[in-house]
Amino acid sequence: MTAETVIEVRGLVNRFGSQTVHENLDLDVRRGEIIGIVGGSGTGKSVLLRTIIGLVRPVAGEVRVFGENLLSLPEEKRSLVERRFGVLFQSGALFSSLTVAENVALPMVEHAKLDRADATRLAGVKLALSGLPVDAGRKSPSQLSGGMIKRAALARALALDPEILFLDEPTAGLDPISAAAFDSLIVTLRDALGLTVFLVTHDLDTLYSTCDRVAVLSQRRVLAVGPIDEVARTDDPWVQAYFNGPRGRAATFAARQGKD
Ligand SMILES: Nc1ncnc2c1ncn2[C@@H]1O[C@H](COP(=O)(O)OP(=O)(O)OP(=O)(O)O)[C@@H](O)[C@H]1O
């Protein structure tokens, strides 16, 4: 039995001026998987994420999330689909004028129309789910460490109980121990909440420790997609340098040690 496809990208074309970022890109994401999106700098990983969530209108092609083309839906229907996914942007993007708990509560007040007291109580649950201590909610984002900000941003992405979680470079800027802790949190949350996770990353350790499948962006399309060991065998110079260079070998070794 094949798993349900929750994201379907077909013949995607994205251009900025004379620069073609994507040309006939196809990708399917299955319910419940953690899929890692990798590729050299500027290959369009973030643009792909932004196109899937409806922030970039492609030149051609089609993107369906839960079977719906977001850009062709009327506002109300689109918002209903948007509530079914959460996004953690690269910067974390918390409002500095709000406490951490208020940041997490905001989508619940704005989209789910909860009153502030209920939303703040629920925000505490989401913060705990994301592994933050109780008192973190009362702090301002500027009082948190980089790792804690990522967790707070994750709590906000989980605010509306999403089915899909989009993560753009979630471990960038974290020390290796915090990054590994964040990776295992993602897997735990996927298992506990049945999430589908679309993960853009450069971090080989993250790929090996979290992803069911990996999609490589190269030459303006998805060059290879599949389990990491299969993809790592693709006959392509970038893939070989990335997966089988010194860092790739170290990550493979670490992943094997972890499984023993
Ligand atoms: N709004 C925009 N206007 C013009 N060009 C853009 C825009 N957004 C992205 N680009 C260009 O599209 C290309 C792909 O960008 P993108 O951020 O998706 O790359 P990436 O693969 O995520 O890179 P990195 O790994 O460095 O984060 C880049 O050359 C970028 O400059």
Image (tube, rainbow, N blue to C red):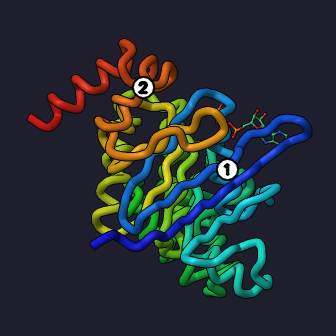
* Rendered position, 236 above or below 55: above
Please tell me whether mark 1 sits on a helix, a strand or a loop.
strand
Residue 82 placement (x, y as % from top left) = 64, 74
User: Which of the pair 225/55 is nearer the observer?
Assistant: 225
Q: At x 89% / y 36%, what residue is drawn? A: 18
Which of the 4 image quadrants contains residue 1? bottom left
Q: Which quadrant of the picture is home to ligand 1?
A: top right
Which of the 4 image quadrants contains residue 101? bottom right
Q: At x 77% / y 48%, what residue is drawn? A: 14
User: Which of the pair 44/184 is nearer the observer?
Assistant: 44
Q: Is residue 145 visible?
A: no
Residue 235 placement (x, y as % from top left) = 42, 25
> Label 1 is placed on what type of residue?
Asn
Tell me if 259 is positioned left or right of 176 in this view.
left
Q: Which mark is residue 235?
A: 2
Q: Circle 1: is it few (<14), some (14-19), or many (20+) Cα within 10 Å?
A: some
Tell me if 100 is positioned left or right of 231 in this view.
right
Please tell me whether mark 2 sits on a helix, a strand or a loop.
loop
Q: At x 63% / y 78%, what residue is drawn? A: 68
Q: Earlier in the sequence, mark 2 or mark 1?
A: 1
Residue designated by label 1 = 24
* Rendered position, 105 above or below 182: below
Q: Is residue 97 visible?
A: yes
